[in-house]
Image: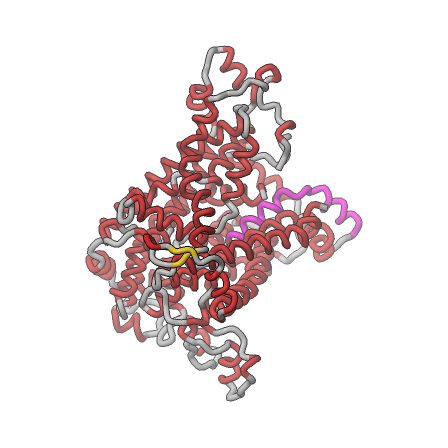
Amino acid sequence: MMNGEIVPTETLSPEQLGKKTEVVARRPPRRISGYLLHLALIAGAVWSVFPFIWMVLTSLKGYVEAAASQAILPQHWLFSNYAAAWNEVGMFPRYFANTIFISAATVLGVLVTSTLAGYAFARMSFPGRNLLFVILLATMMVPFEVTLVPNFILMRRLGWIDTYSALIIPWTASAFSIFLMRQFFRSIPGELYDAAVIDGSTHLRFLVSIVIPLSKPALITSALLTFLGSWNSLMWPLLVTNSPQLRPLQVGVATFITDAGTQVQLLLAAVTISVVPVILLYLFLQRWFIEGIATIGIRG
Amino acid sequence: MESWGDVPILPVRTRRIIEWTAYLFILPAFIIVGAFHIFPVFYAIYISLNQGAINQFHFVGLQNYLQALTGSDFWSSLATTFIYAFMTLPVTIFLGLFFAYLLYQRVRGRGIYRTLFFLPYVISTVGSSIIWAWVFNPENGLANHLLSLAGIQPLRWLIEPSGVFGVLAAQFNWTIPSWAQGPSLALVAVSIFTVWQSMGYDVVLFLAGLTSLPGELYEAARIDGANAVQLFRFITLPLLAPTTFFVVVVSVIASLQSFNQIFAMNTAAAQTLGGPLETTNTLTVYMFNQLYTYSNYGYASALAVLLSLIILALTLLNFRLLGRRAEA
């Protein structure tokens, strides 16, 4: 049944995507007047984007101006605020390095665990397969808050408080990614595997040499969503770290709120520094972000 | 979920063979998921039946639950949670569907609009809540600036515990009875932020749903003389029901669980971790305070279990109310 499956060439490949939207765009009715349509869309876009523009503009103002003036544009464009914010948050380079390390390690872990498990669920037969898969899916329904306290205690028992282990290891497997991989792998024709078996290939070799190269879209989507979650997480790192040396960027920015006090322009400069990498990543790879979200949605 | 039998995964001759290596394949994932996602669920239930510091738990039965259910804090935080959900969900879903439907028309620059709409969703809540806390700043925020253009006195937004209707009425020197004050302005401000943050997600989901609809029906209906409103009402909406259902289920769960938005925004507004206002204490915020500030592990776990039960019940209710219609 291909119906409802994630079909790589249709759902996720950029070339195909372009074609698909073109076809669809021709279909719907054109009753609403074009001007009104664009007016509404522009209003929506402005609503979505104005806080960022305002953030950047305010981050370039002087102290008095940021705190008291209501002019939209800065009187003098103080790019030095960025250097000041960078120096003020003495740990900025460290926070960045922590976040990049934590995110990269988490993504790597998720890719390995979910590729292996997704393949087993998609292509191999073993007793308890359905049951284990359902158990896995059920964990997606459990609110994060429920596992928060036990995991915190677990970290203390393991002696992982204030270590990278606590920040990385619990998140190196995700039911969602396993699900995504399994769906994708199932759309790869079974004949390929039959041919590989005749050539004497094992599952692992087939997975590494054929399935993985074919599954770039699913791998990228899974990596991106994991990366985003890791980069943006706040509550967990706040709980399991005490020393600033280990804290990721978000926690660093959150604590800078207190330190910056009334120096709003510095705070907003720090925020800008912390969001620019994600914005750039998103703008370059937005198709994968959006397709990933849309795919989960269609799956239901 | 489709049945397993439909998919000829393996040639028939090999199907009965048990591939033991499969367990090695799933082992790494299940070690992690088992240790940090499955085991903690049972551990949470156990903790919720105890009290005391981490190494000195003592069993107290259902006392934590009784404390929650008979005290006022749990109920008021639950009420706040639901008010927050009622303020954010319908607006977000409506705007999401609205903009998705506009983008579904033949629009030039559709990709650009979609990119911009989705942008808030990828930005960390910490970052965007700092921005919004400044938008809502009582002294020099953009929100008050806009209000002043309309001749409205500056409001205190995130640090305003009074009800929103009361605050509005005060602008005209009216007083309204306490039962009609409405949710606190602080909670309204957090809700505006939440709508801003999650709208793009709904746009993307609805747009994906819309583009998967069969186009022939539109052709047929237009030949029959249906107008735009009729097309939307009688073709788009019914066919979109599965997507709508999914969006509703996911959004209900997400809004009952939302913590980051409220926590980060309060922190940014008050310039201390957690923030000062009880009127924005949703269940998750209340739970986190019990954990982080008071180290009441047992009580916090009981709250978490209660929250999951509420989420489970609402999800089942959604399936009953909307699920059947979505499948039809």
Decide which of B177, B87 is in the foreground and name it. B177
Residue B321 lies left or right of residue B46; in this view the side is right
Residue B212 part of the magenta-drawn span: yes
> Which x, y percent locates residue A35?
59, 59
Q: What stretch is highlighted in magenta?
A: B201-225
Q: In which quarter of the image is the N terminus of chain B?
A: top right
Number of dots carrying numbers: 0
- The residue shown at (39%, 62%) is B290
> Which x, y percent locates residue A260?
26, 65
Residue A53, visible in the rendered structure:
no
Residue B243 lies left or right of residue A137; in this view the side is right
What type of secondary structure mainly makes up the magenta span?
Answer: helix
- Quarter of the image for residue B30 reads top left
Residue B215 part of the magenta-drawn span: yes
Single out the residue that lies furthest toward the top: A199
Residue A293, visible in the rendered structure:
yes
- The residue shown at (45%, 39%) is A221
Residue B144 lies left or right of residue A65; in this view the side is right
- The residue shown at (35%, 65%) is B268
- Name the colour scheme: secondary structure
Single out the residue that lies furthest toward the right: B224
Decide which of A154, B17 is in the foreground and name it. A154
> Which x, y percent locates residue B81?
51, 64
Relative to A269, residue A66 above or below: below
Relative to A27, residue B160 above or below: below
